[in-house]
Amino acid sequence: MSADTNATASGDALLDLVRPDLRGFGGYRSARSEALQGDVWLNANESAWSNPADADGACRRYPDPQPAALVDALARLYGVDADTLVIGRGSDEAIDLIVRALCVPGRDAVLATPPVFGMYAVSARLQGARYVEVSLVEDDASFAIDPEAIVAAARAQSAKVVFLCSPSNPTGRAIPVERIETIASALRGRALVVVDEAYAEFADGEGALRLRARHRNLAVLRTLSKAHGLAAARIGCAIVDPALARVLRACQAPYPLPAPCIALALEALAPPALERTRERVAVVRDERERLRAALAAHPGVRRVYGSDANFLLVRFDDAQRAFDALLAAGVVVRDQRAAPRLGDALRITIGTPQQNERVLSALAALRQVAA
Ligand SMILES: *Cc1c(COP(=O)(O)O)cnc(C)c1O
């Protein structure tokens, strides 16, 4: 690639956000990307025999990089066009791909809103991109983003990527879509606004997906790791403008989706499993409210934040004692005390009704000692 390419704008405001040195980059052309037909495949140095551990031979050959059946199933699930999907190893890979494709090391910045999910900062650091923080603001009821401050900081510090987490981890609340739209409008041509919706299934409303029709600089991340119960299968996706999707696919590892994971995901997206998933999401939502009310009534609890996700953020008078009491009862929760402004907080994932009972009884013991 010549140095000249670096200076050329693509003539497309969205693609101009891509690193100049990656414009026109096709990525690795794997044996699987050639549209050839035949019945004896000797083009990829695969073994002619299956491994004894792989009885039906499903893993003998390299997998399709973006298998059409899975692309179609996810497109149907999210109600989006197939060419907008980039499927990868969890939404964590999508975060990393976006930062790598857009941010010039040592020049561009990534913006996020702490306290928030830690991977945005990790990806920025690995890419050598500055990490710009615009804190959430806390009112009586919850943490919320400050759209004006986000837009101002993104402009002033030339952020190429703005991460909005909705519902937010660990603070729990979804961002109203109008606020997301305000930010996407204000940063058109300047930044890609990425809405990480890892917990969207647990929230009311349809999230940011439908905003994409009006805002090409809006990306949405979804995953099968949380509501769908497939964290170990590592299947997540970015839903982006088709032209940007082609860029991200070119930046991806050659065969990002292992065949056993593709098979699992397809089964999880078939109607019987989807029906069970929806039932379980309903259980989580009911349990979330039950646990929230019970914790709010606990004398050692300072505050329980409202949640649109599958966890609760809880402030304690003595978070260490609460953490220890839970651990002594065999219940492991997430200690949030190192996060900014969460020095007294634990994040408790909603479990089965029985597991949530264990949480409450462990904390009831704490109340007796306190009394
Ligand atoms: C859990 C989580 C993810 C990671 O999802 P994977 O698809 O498993 O990589 C992404 N974003 C947020 C906010 C999360 O909490």
Image (spheres, grey):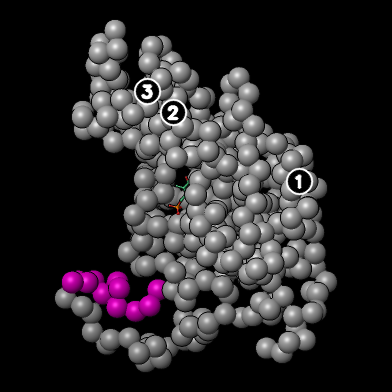
Quarter occupied by residue 320 = top left
Classify mark 1: helix, strand or loop: helix
**Disc 2 marks which amino acid?**
Asp
Is 85 in the magenta? Answer: no
Depicted 56 relative to depicted 323: above or below: below
Residue sitting farthest toward the top: 371
Q: Which residue is mark 1?
A: 151
Residue 257: image x %, image y %?
42, 67
Mark 1 against mark 2, which lies toward the viewer? 2
Q: Which residue is mark 3?
A: 318
In the picture, measured across the screen, residue 334 lies left or right of residue 57, that is: right
Residue sitting farthest toward the left: 52
**Disc 1 marks which amino acid?**
Val
Depicted 367 relative to depicted 257: above or below: above
In the picture, measured across the screen, residue 86 lies left or right of residue 193, that is: left
Q: Which residue is mark 2?
A: 344
**Disc 3 marks which amino acid?**
Asp
> Rounded to the nearest whole Å, what is the CA distance between mark 1 and mark 3?
37 Å
Q: Is residue 173 visible?
A: yes
> Rounded to the nearest whole Å, what is the CA distance between mark 1 and mark 2?
30 Å
Front residue of this view, candidates 205 and 128: 128
Q: Is residue 191 visible?
A: no
Classify mark 3: helix, strand or loop: loop
* Residue range of the region highlighted in magenta in the rendering: 53-64
Quarter occupied by residue 316 = top left
Classify mark 2: helix, strand or loop: loop
